[in-house]
């Protein structure tokens, strides 16, 4: 699981002794917010180790296709 008291979406934030720069979740949240979506991370509630990521897209999300 994750330490939910830490903002893992902050740039260059890593939990524990993990490798990487710490930009992946920051970029994911920035992209989600750019389209009006929400992204969250929480610990699993079923007693199994791990975490759950949730992406909620706005219902009015649309993509205009070019006319031929």
Image: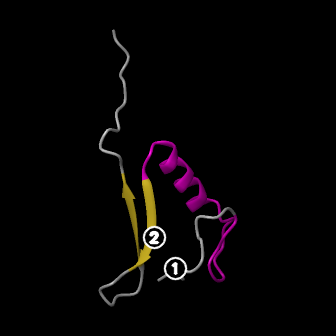
| Residue at 48% over, 50% down | 32
Q: Does 63 sit left or right of 18 as displayed? A: left
> Magenta segment range?
12-37
Q: Which mark is residue 26?
A: none
Location of residue 49 (image quadrant)? bottom left
Q: Is residue 57 above or below residue 5?
A: above
Q: Which mark is residue 4?
A: 1
Location of residue 20 (image quadrant)? bottom right
Indicate whether residue 25 is drawn in magenta: yes
Indicate whether residue 14 is drawn in magenta: yes
The crowding category of the residue bearing disc 2, from other C-alpha atoms within 10 Å (few below 14, some 14 to 19, many at least 20), is some
In the rendered view of the protein, which quadrant contains the C terminus? top left
| Residue at 29% over, 86% down | 46
Q: SS of the residue at dot 2?
A: strand
Q: Residue 41's spot in the image, x, y percent? A: 45, 70
Q: Are marks 1 and 2 in contact (CB under 8 Å)?
A: yes
- Identify the residue position indicated by label 2 in the image: 41
Q: Residue 53's spot in the image, x, y percent? A: 41, 67
| Residue at 35% over, 38% down | 61
Q: SS of the residue at dot 1?
A: loop
Q: Is residue 37 above or below residue 49?
A: above
Q: Does 49 sit left or right of 18 as displayed? A: left
């Amino acid at each position: 699981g994750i330490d939910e008291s830490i903002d893992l979406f902050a740039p260059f934030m890593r939990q524990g002794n993990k490798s990487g720069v710490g930009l992946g979740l920051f970029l994911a949240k920035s992209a989600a917010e750019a389209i009006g979506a929400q992204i969250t991370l929480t610990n699993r509630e079923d007693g199994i180790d791990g975490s759950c990521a949730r992406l909620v897209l706005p219902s009015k999300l649309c993509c205009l296709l070019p006319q031929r």
